Image (spheres, helix red, strand yellow):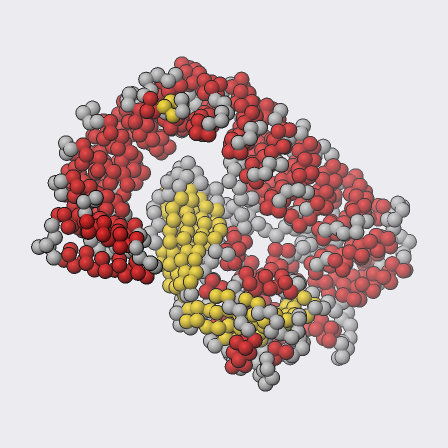
Amino acid sequence: MSGMRGLSVFISDIRNCQNKEAERLRVDKELGNIRTCFKNDKVLTPYKKKKYVWKMLYIHMLGYDVDFGHMEAVSLISAPKYPEKQVGYIVTSCLLNENHDFLRLAINAVRNDIIGRNETFQCLALTLVGNIGGREFAESLSPDVQKLLISSSCRPLVRKKAALCLLRLFRKNPDVVNADGWADRMAQLLDERDLGVLTSSMSLLVSLVSNDYEGYSSCLPKCVKTLERLARNQDVPQEYTYYGIPSPWLQVKTMRALQYFPTIEDPSTRRSLFEVLQRILMGTDVVKNVNKNNASHAVLFEALSLVMHLNAEKEMMSQCVALLGKFISVREPNIRYLGLENMTRMLMITDAQDIIKKHQPQIITSLKDPDISIRRRALDLLYGMCDVSNAKGIVEELLQYLSTAEFGMREELSLKAAILAEKFAPDLSWYVDVILQLIDKAGDFVSDDIWFRVVQFVTNNEDLQPYAASKVREYMDKIAIHETMVKVSAYILGEFGHLLARRPGCSARELFGILHEKLPTVSTPTIPLLLSTYAKLLMHAQPPDIELQKQIWTVFKKYESSIDVEIQQRAVEYFELSKKGAALMDVLAEMPKFPERQSSLIKKVEDVEDSADQSAIKLRAQQLPSNALVLADPQPVNGTPPPLKVPSISGIKLDHESASQAQSQPNGNLSSQIPSADLLGDLVDPLAIEAPPGDISSQQRGLTEEEGILDEVDGTAIVPVGEQTNTVEPIGNIAERFHALCLKDSGVLYEDPYIQIGVKAEWRGHHGRLVLFLGNKNTSALASVKALILPPAHLKLELSLVPDTIPPRAQVQCPLEVMNIRPSRDVAVLDFSYKFGTSMVSAKLRLPAVLNKFLQPLQLTSEEFFPQWRSLSGPPLKLQEVVRGVRPLALPEMENLFNSFRVTICPGLDPNPNNLVASTTFYSENTRAMLCLARIETDPADRTQLRLTVASGDPTLTFELKEFIKEQIIAIPLGSRALVPAVPGPAAPLAQPPSPAVDANDPGALLAGLL
């Protein structure tokens, strides 16, 4: 290359370009020159061909597409001289992939170089095959590569390359290496004295035994002898000694190969191996030299994995744990991390569990480490090592750490503390104390399942009920408590508050007073629970308290006209029942005990995404006894947990369907009002959220449509087609993953025990590019991998080739090109399937190529906004709708919500401070760049409804964007739906109170009648 003046001048010209455009022009000029020369064979000498091919490679390295000249590069492989042949091999390896058609033309030339006598040509050919060899190369060249590997006349340099080349071919086609005919040859290769050939052969052996270890049992003693040779530093050349450690790479690979074999039966081989492992454990220490530390600890931790695999004697296990205990106290964070991770894995071994407990203080200290990854590993280890003997101390430490833990860990920390308290509680009163402390310290991160669980325990244990009621009464005296604490307290005091009636400050009127003080601070879903508690307190007041009855009836009357149908129904029914006395006693009788079931919290913690090895923790949890009552939900079929059923204080049965109906509200139909002719049209009108006039059937149709929207939004990301036969459960909530990816551009789309599918996207105008990351989480390959895109009519999708097999612990990337044709809310579906062992797993996943991905945020001034708003006059370009069932959000939170799906809020345009004005630009092939405007009118007195107006120059876009925004703001409260679900078993029938007369001048009563 140094003698090619034309190439040097071209590189110099590229470096001297002042900008990207000048560089592109120079590259285009050179590509045109190369193309012209390749067409004229008369003037194309071998020297010029070599020079032009080098230029093509340089242009390819700059990032430009080189879609010609491949034939010339391949033809240089057949050249008789080394300079031309070298260029051909290098450029072919860089420009072509294993599926390129031109590679078939080079197979014969490559084979001739492999079977030839020129070692330099053999190395070039083996390097090419090792880099880009596919199935055709494997079928054609594997016999010749095997002959080179076992040949005694070839130099070690060639044999090393042959071993790595055969490894590549085996990964592409496992049939090329037959265990019956190759096991003896593999054993002979392990006797090789050259460590370079031995290291390459060991890499090949690791791949072979990971696929089938039974055929290579003769290699096991040879691996032990290799370890003995290295541990004693016998016959190890100086160039293979790294900071005094004999070939650490070969030691790691050898021990990894041994872990694929079952327990070693031969006593002498087992004794020799344990002597080597003992030497490694005794000879490893932390030194100041970082490079030596890295090498020695790589060998050490692989040796620890082998010790655990072999289930060694208790003395060696004690030594391993003591060594790990020393490592978790050093200053180097990487060593501390590995020490904690390996301790977690050692929990699988029964003999090591008691020894690990001795290091509990140091593990607890790791919870305060500055590195969050170390803190997570310490939390996993504490969770796994917990049992009846140390549960109290560990849970108390976790509660203490909860106050200072970062927000990213608090949810997982709360869940694990709750499970440990449930499984290993010395008594149930301690369990109640722990959960109440959890709610008090981290209420935002305590899921509903946790306080549901407390309610179940208290209901099922009569001796616990007075204690629990007194504890929540103490928490209610605090000035500021979390809403979850209000829920727990309301339920327990409503059911069991009468047990405290003789205590000072615990009469029914006083309990009502402290609970009613919290009513203004809670959200809408909590109000029905408080109303049920009020009815319970009124029922238990003995003797009857007339003053208390008046206060509670005032509350019921206040909420009889509530816009929320659940609140309204409870208020009306409780008010009527409270007038009847005996009927109230029957309906609001004490809740029955819950049936015994398995805990749902334990299942939930398994769904927490974490990179640590959880197998030891799960096995440990199965071995330990539990003091807890078993109560949980049935196993879901397709990974989506069913709605949790907990008692309703009112005694009313509220299943999933009725709960969803209680949350859904009929939205107003499209308004066809003509805007006024003032500056902003209807923009400056006062907010008047009223349903448009219509008959009852139209309201029922609105309810049906709304239920459909809720079902669509809350549906799982797996689209069921036919009968689901998968036995593999997804990890995590797939619907939540999809909705999260709709608002961000990277994250996990799907995960199960075998595979993780991640997404990373880029969007520009109406074009998009998604990269699917398919990661194999196991030590075995995933076969029969198939991915098919089911595109909607408005999207053009092109998915690159998906490999049929994903190697162990490997990740492949599959780019997906997206082009938006027209506005639509339809979603593309990825039909994905793979085979693991004998199990065939398939899933249909929604892809986050949704409407808001083709929006571009745009902020307008008043001079830009007003003319556009006036020009869009009425339907179908401007649509307006009253939306109900919206979660109450403050205006800043509403702004953040709209900004998250790329609709920009324009501040200062609306004179009403309770309204928002927004703008964005939508891109599609049909509409090109289309301006979209929106106005959101809210009512400070009732944040559960708003009026939405959307305008654009395309009728379809206006409708689709309006529906999309409506889905987003309605979808917010779905996670908390059915707050107080049903009690198993039939509920007592309720007498329906007569409907009161509707005052024609009372808008609340009219609205209640419509609902």
Residue 353 position by quadrant = top right
Residue 414's x, y, as percent?
65, 43
Residue 121's x, y, as percent?
18, 36
Residue 80 position by quadrant = top left
Question: Total marks drawn?
Answer: 0
Q: Residue furthest bottom?
A: 677
Residue 221 appears anywhere in the view:
no
Residue 394's x, y, as percent?
66, 33
Left of 82 or right of it: where is 991?
right
- Residue appearing at x 80%, y 57% in the figure: 516
Q: Residue furthest left?
A: 42
Q: In the image shown, does 891 or 951 lie closer to the viewer? A: 891
Residue 873 appears anywhere in the view:
yes
Q: Give the vertical position of 558 relative to 161 (above or below).
A: below
User: Which quadrant of the figure contains the N terminus?
Assistant: top left
- Residue appearing at x 40%, y 58% in the figure: 769
Q: In the image shown, does 871 or 634 lie closer to the viewer? A: 871
Residue 409's x, y, as percent?
60, 43
Q: Residue furthest top?
A: 268
User: Which quadrant of the figure contains the C terminus?
Assistant: bottom right
Left of 202 or right of it: where is 35?
left
Q: Give the vertical position of 321 relative to 905 (above or below).
A: above
Q: Give the vertical position of 147 relative to 674 (above or below).
A: above
- Residue appearing at x 56%, y 36% in the figure: 374
- Residue appearing at x 39%, y 38% in the figure: 808
Residue 471 position by quadrant = top right
Left of 185 or right of it: where is 764?
right
